[in-house]
Amino acid sequence: MASISKTAQLQIRVSAAQKSAIQRAAVRAGMNMSNYVLSRVLSVPGTQFQDTVRQCAGSEPRHALAELNSLLSNLTAGELREAIAAPPGVLLTPLLANTIAAMVELACARRDIALPAWTGGIEPLPVPAFGSTLQSVRLHLLKSSPAPFRRRNLFVDSTLGDRI
């Protein structure tokens, strides 16, 4: 995963005994104190989701979308709920935002959990987007795309949990 630049500081007051306990726990975990405290406070699935979405916004979104697919497919219902609680923290193109929202909605449907509110704020694409440029495949894509993708005007064959 890509490293995030740390530009802010957080100070907390602890007793000398608490500080020593945190230092010992960090050493046992093989981490520095800052990373140890962050790992205990922040959601690991949420961080993984945000990092992968950030990669999707990069220059090679297909690879990152495959990684996001794997991540969402392998999370338990509780981990998924935790991972997708916050909206993507990066600016996405409408196509990418809809693709990620559809992937999240499909994962939620498969785990029978409520959709996160942020997916409802992403407007569906105004024109259809197909997963193939071949005209002969479009009818198949129109019929076989999962409902969350169709609702967003996205027509794909291979989606969450599926592989070509």
Image (cartoon, rainbow, N blue to C red):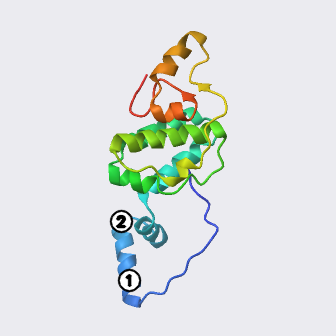
Question: In the image, what residue occupies the spot 62% across and 60% down?
Answer: 5
Q: On the image, numbered disc 1 is attached to which residue?
A: 20
Residue at image x 44%, y 53%?
83
Vertical placement of residue 126 versus 15, above or below: above
Q: Indicate the position of residue 2 as horizontal and vertical percent values.
A: 56, 50
Nearer to me, 147 or 163? 147
Image mark for residue 29: 2
> In which quadrant of the rendered image does the C terminus lie?
top left
Side (left or right) of 133 relative to 113: right
Residue 9 in the figure: left or right of residue 1: right
- In the drawing, what numbered circle is on residue 128? none
Residue 145, how many percent across, how many down? 47, 26
Q: Residue at x 35, y 76 (%)?
A: 24
Q: Is residue 122 above or below residue 31?
A: above
SS label for mark 2:
helix
- Compared across the picture, whether 78 is left or right of 164 comes to left
- At label 2, which amino acid type do we have? Ala
Amino acid type, label 1: Ser
- Spatial separation of the CA atoms under disc 2 and disc 1: 14 Å
Residue 158 visible (yes or no):
yes
Drawn side of residue 119 relative to residue 82, left or right: right
Q: Crowdedness of circle 2 by 10 Å Cα count: few (<14), some, many (20+)?
A: few
| Mark 1 Cα shell of 10 Å, populated few (<14), some (14-19), many (≥20) | few
Q: Which of marks 2 and 1 is nearer the N terminus?
A: 1
Q: Residue 1, can we see it?
A: no
The location of residue 111, given as percent across then percent down, is 34, 44
Which of the pair 77/64 is nearer the observer?
77
Q: Residue at x 43, y 61 (%)?
A: 43
Q: Are marks 2 and 1 in contact (CB under 8 Å)?
A: no
